[in-house]
Amino acid sequence: MNQPLLDTSTTEAIDSTSNFIAASNDSLFINAEIINSLKAEIAGNALLSNNLWMMVATALMFIMHLGFATLESGLSRSKNTTNILFKNTIIPAMGILIFGLWGYNLMYPGSHFEGNFIGFSGFGIAAPEDSSYLGASNYTFWSFFLFQAMFAATATTIVSGAVAERIKIWSFILFSFLLVGIIYPIIGFWAWGGGFLQKMDIQFYDFAGSTVVHSVGGWSALAGVIVLGPRIGKYIDNRIIPLPGHSMPLATIGVFLLWFGWFGFNGGSVLSANPKLVSLVLVTTCLSASAGAIGALTTSFITTKTIDHSMVLNGILGGLVAITAGADKMNPSEAIIIGLTSGALVVLAVLLFDKLRIDDPVGAISVHLICGTFGTLAVGFMGDLAEIHGTKQLISQVIGIASTGLFVFPSTYLIFILIDKTIGLRVTAKEELEGLDIGIHGMRAYHIDNAK
């Protein structure tokens, strides 16, 4: 997301105070020092409130990692629960470190950098001396860094669910290292850090990352699933064999944690505590998620004649992913349309990928790639920007989506192939059948004590 110079509400408050004081000078002398003191106090209070909201949003995003962990483990078989939990524990830890060591400076090399495709301002993180880089009255450098680090870790978490139950743990860690350390920051630079997508005449718009975060994770997940192949027993002859997850309660808890965290994911992307805009974003986010549930429920019942709770859960996530690109540019009615469409797309995509023998245990590709792409496109044909720029905005959205896919999918596919040809990508058949908890971690997630 772009870094604003000054929050609109703060500017209006300062201007209003200045005008009042200037008018008062006609009848009463006021020392210039008092005027400057009042302005400084207003600016200080604005920084405090805006930065506080950024920190709260960051905390909400952090809890999303628990949501991913419980969702993915719930939709996987019990014999792989510890493995899923481990991956979703190590990802944020590793991701935050990598983003601090160099990822942030690869994604945000600074306003002085004139490149279009890649930039780098050195290793490590340190607040720049130029205070204008701190978002003026909106937030500190440190708040922005930590907020962005949560996004970086999320992109890799998306891949975890899609390749679940059959990938080697060290191979997955190596891939995650490359994704969060190189690929994600480059896409982030293109769209948010001053790269070519941000420099187009009609700027590619991705408010909180339907493409930058979710499609990057979705394209990577698709590449990984293709190289890995399906789980043993998933497809036999021309039949699709269900391999259901072991805990719908865990999966449901995970989705509600993610929905809760998304208020920070999207709400924090306003990059200030602007009351009008933050409120709108929270409303459109929540409406799209709710409509996603209804869209998935309806489509699932029509296509499969069942009330599939896992489809409804993914419909909620699909609505959240899709609205993320334009949550600040849509009105409530448009948010509902986006959510309903996304919920339907999730169900249809899951069924399509199964027919294509693309085995995604949690539906991550359907949720994050398909709905992320749709939500980004939606900015080009509905909402404020479509109304202002018309077809030109849609063209910019298509360019952003296409350039992301053309870079991320081949890159991650090649990485998976190289890993497979060197240290190996997939666990042995014995480990897969016994479960990765025992085969890799030497422990079970659940111990049932039958002793009386």
Image (cartoon, rainbow, N blue to C red):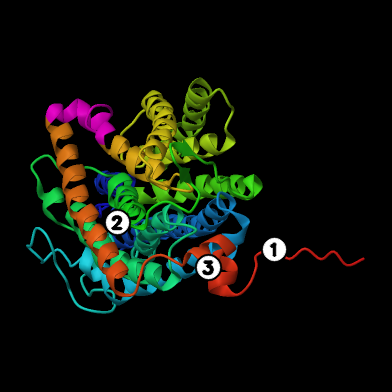
Q: Are marks 1 and 3 in contact (CB under 8 Å)?
A: no
| Residue 32 is at least partly visible in this image | no
Question: Which is nearer the eye, 96 or 132?
Answer: 96
Q: Which residues are magenta?
A: 377-391
Apparent side of residue 209 relative to residue 191 in the rendered image (left or right): right
Where does residue 211 sit, x and y in percent of width and height?
28, 46
Q: Quadrant of the C terminus?
A: bottom right
- Residue hosting label 3: 86
Residue 384: within the magenta?
yes
Residue drawn 11% across the image and 59% down it: 117
Residue 244: within the magenta?
no
Q: Nearer the viewer, mark 1 or mark 3?
A: 1
- Residue hosting label 1: 446
- The earlier-in-sequence mark between 1 and 2 is 2
Disc 1 marks a residue whose amino acid type is Tyr
Can you tell which quarter of the image residue 373 is in? Answer: top left
Residue drawn 60% across the image and 44% down it: 252
Where does residue 111 sit, x and y in percent of width and height?
14, 63
